Image (cartoon, rainbow, N blue to C red):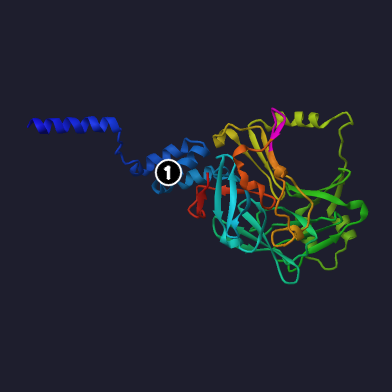
Amino acid sequence: MAYHKRNRAHEKKSRRTNNVDHRDWAGLPRDLVDDISKRLPILPTVNMAAACESWRCAISEQVLTKKKKFVGFPWLMVRGENMRVRTCFSILENRVRKLSVPEAMGKYLFGSFQDWLITAERRCNSKIVFSFWNPFSRTKKLCLPAVSDKYYKMVFSASPDDANCVILLLGRCRRRFACWAPGLNNLFEVLLDQDYAFVDAAFCNGRFYFVKSDFSIFTSDAEAMISLMKEVGITWEMFRNRCLRGHQVAMPSERATRAHVWHDLVESCGDRILFVATDGSSSFSAKELGADIGNRVYFVNDHVHGFRQYEWSASSPKHNNFDDWGVFGMSSKSYFIPENSGNYMKLGWLPIWITWWYISDNNPQIRRDS
């Protein structure tokens, strides 16, 4: 009898010492898990969804819909250890990960737009074929007809799976651009006059914006471009007269330095985190993300180079200076590269941003490196 009492006392003491928790956290009621997820910012929600499958499945579609623009955040992607695996740096988590992308085998990851990765593949006739691949739904959409390597930048009016999407390609020689829309068999290519050498382009609120080297701006309505592309024998003069509109731009005085420009932007950034990329940019609320890193700009430089220098080329540079990406703190007016981005950034090709959607049943498998 005394032995049993001593044994029970020993067991109680052992449980207190080891502090063992036998509660079934994975078995929490689905309604409770769902209610908790509704009250959390995105980063805690991400960690909660990653804890176990039952918690991830319990997070309701209502939460996912409400947080759709926040259930993913940018990763910086470079070429991985082989053609099927790409190395990524998760900025907000401060972690290096490996992403399996077998669909990109033998292709160059040119950029990204919304949920879509842009892959480029060289064909035997020296043409480039662009495909748009959604790694979360595993959907592949072949969009553009084969194009030469005269173009370096791609601008979208909408998602590639939108029937009214217009895709614009900007030429690296600055005197040409091409555009295309679903349903067209060929690209609509335009050779520009010397007075219309565009150095950059963007899309906003139904219009493409073209910028010249003197910073003058021209706009073109996307719907008008679709109508024009369906016609035959369209010349540059016809496009210029029917679609292009010039705008006067008030330039800052010579005394307005870069510091003044950045100072003007500080107040407008506020809580936002900006991710600036070649093919598409995005912004997030630091508060809604649950990250204390607002008022920053994450960027990759926009280089004017052709496809000949890309991944499939034997002459492609394998050692790049990754000062071509970084972070600008708007409050401190300082530039830096996160320390934990790792030595993996020293080798490979120029990085691209992708938006990684964590809370999804269709996520490809990932592996954490550090």
As drawn, the residue found furthest toward the right would be: 194
Report the front residue among 102 and 293.
Answer: 102
Looking at the picture, does residue 239 appear above or below residue 68?
below
Q: Is residue 265 left or right of residue 249?
A: left
The part of the chain drawn in magenta is 327-335
Q: Position of residue 299 (x, y in %)?
A: 69, 42
Looking at the picture, does residue 273 appear above or below residue 129?
above
Q: Which quadrant is the N terminus positioned in?
A: top left
Q: Position of residue 150 (x, y in %)?
A: 80, 60
Q: Secondary structure at mark 1?
A: helix
Displayed quadrant of residue 339:
top right
Query: Is 369 part of what is drawn in magenta?
Result: no
As drawn, the residue found furthest toward the bottom would be: 124
Q: Position of residue 286 (x, y in %)?
A: 59, 34
Give the residue at mark 1: 51
Query: Is 328 part of what is drawn in magenta?
Result: yes
